[in-house]
Each structure stands twice: as structure tokens, then as C-alpha cells.
Amino acid sequence: MAVYFVQCRATAHVKIGFSEDAARRVCKINADSPAGVDLIGVYVDGGVEDEAALHVRFAEHRVHGEWFEPHEVLLALIARFPVPTVERFGGFDGTKLTNTQIVAATGLSKSYVSDMRRGFAPITVAVAAMVFEATGVQVGPLRGLEPREAELITRVCATPYHAAQPASEAA
């Protein structure tokens, strides 16, 4: 859940919105907008109550619905909630693979791969190992490792966990 802030490229108006999946919502707004929008801030821990409070706080600058004039106080507030970047979660390191290729190789959902690539979804060690094993691409916590280190972590993640056997069974 997050409160997100998008800015219209043509008018500079700012939309204050809330979504369970901010990345997907912003993509939808952008697709529906004739001028396009840019994500300019995300309050990751924000809820629907926070969105409503912001609508009340900036009501005098409302243009229409959830769209507001880009007032300097609003923009200063938004600056405190930077857009999550790929670097925030480790991201992808310059891979030329498409999302579709990564989905086909790993079985991950297309929306999850897209969110990882844009920095909206965390990349766990297990997911990073799966991507590396399937594609050879180091993402998230495996980025920057020597190939042999990434291979070792991938093997460890791929090894099923088995509870320790009692000593009498182990012999």
C-alpha cells in the first residue's frame, strides 16, 4: 500500500492517489493519459487515510478530483518521499534480457519481473538466485559478485532444506 504522486507532463498538475499496487496504478494512469505522467513521489507506508488527509490539506489547490496545482508546499512535501528506484532494491544490472525472456526462463509473473526491474518490488536472495540460475544475470543481492560467488549462493538456495536426522538414522 502506498500514497503516490504523479505529475502530468502537459499541465504539471499533481495527482495524489492511493493504491495497493502503486506501480501498476501509475502505469494505468500513464496509459490513459493523453499527455503522459511521471511518478514524482511515493509514500510507501501511506494508507487511504493519509491520501484523504492530503486531499483535505491541499483542497484549496484542487483542480479536479484528485488533481492539484503544483503548489510549492505540495512539491516540497513530495520531495520528502522520493520515488523508489531500481537501486533501492538492488535492481537489474544492465541486462539486455526482456521481461518476457526473464518470465519464460524463471516462471516468475510478468508483473513481478516488471516491478523488480523498476525498483518497486524487493528482490530476495532466493529470487535473485533463481534469475541467475535461469539466465546468468546477477540481480538484487547477487549484483556485483564474482560469478563463482553467485553460483555458490544459487546452489545453496537450490538445495532443499532437510531437518536434521536423529543420530540413529544418520548412520
Image (cartoon, helix red, strand yellow):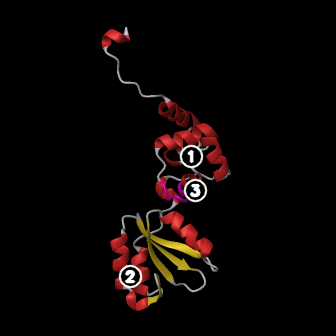
- At mark 2, the secondary structure is helix
- Residue under label 3: 114
Q: Residue furthest bottom?
A: 60
Q: What is the x, y in percent for residue 7?
A: 53, 79
Name the one closer to the observer, 151 or 43: 43
* Magenta-span inclusion, residue 116: yes
Q: What is the x, y in percent for residue 109?
A: 57, 50
* Amino acid type, label 2: His
Q: Earlier in the sequence, mark 3 or mark 1?
A: 1
Residue 55 disc label: 2
Residue at 56% in and 55% down: 111
Residue 136 visible somewhere in the drawing:
no
Apparent side of residue 7 relative to residue 16 in the rendered image (left or right): right
State how far apart marks 2 and 3 are (Cα).
Answer: 30 Å
State how far apart marks 2 and 1 are (Cα).
Answer: 37 Å
Q: What is the x, y in percent for residue 72?
A: 43, 86
Please tell me how crowded label 1 is: few (under 14), some (14-19), or many (20+) other residues with Cα within 10 Å.
Answer: some
Q: What is the x, y in percent for residue 25?
A: 52, 67
**Which stretch appears magenta?**
115-121
Please tell me how crowded label 2 is: few (under 14), some (14-19), or many (20+) other residues with Cα within 10 Å.
Answer: many
Residue 73 visible somewhere in the drawing:
yes
Residue 82 vertical placement versus 99 (above, below): below
* Amino acid type, label 3: Ser
Residue 23 vertical placement versus 151 (above, below): below
Q: Earlier in the sequence, mark 2 or mark 1?
A: 2
Residue 108 disc label: 1
* Amino acid type, label 1: Leu
Name the one closer to the observer, 41 or 60: 60
Name the one closer to the observer, 70 or 104: 104
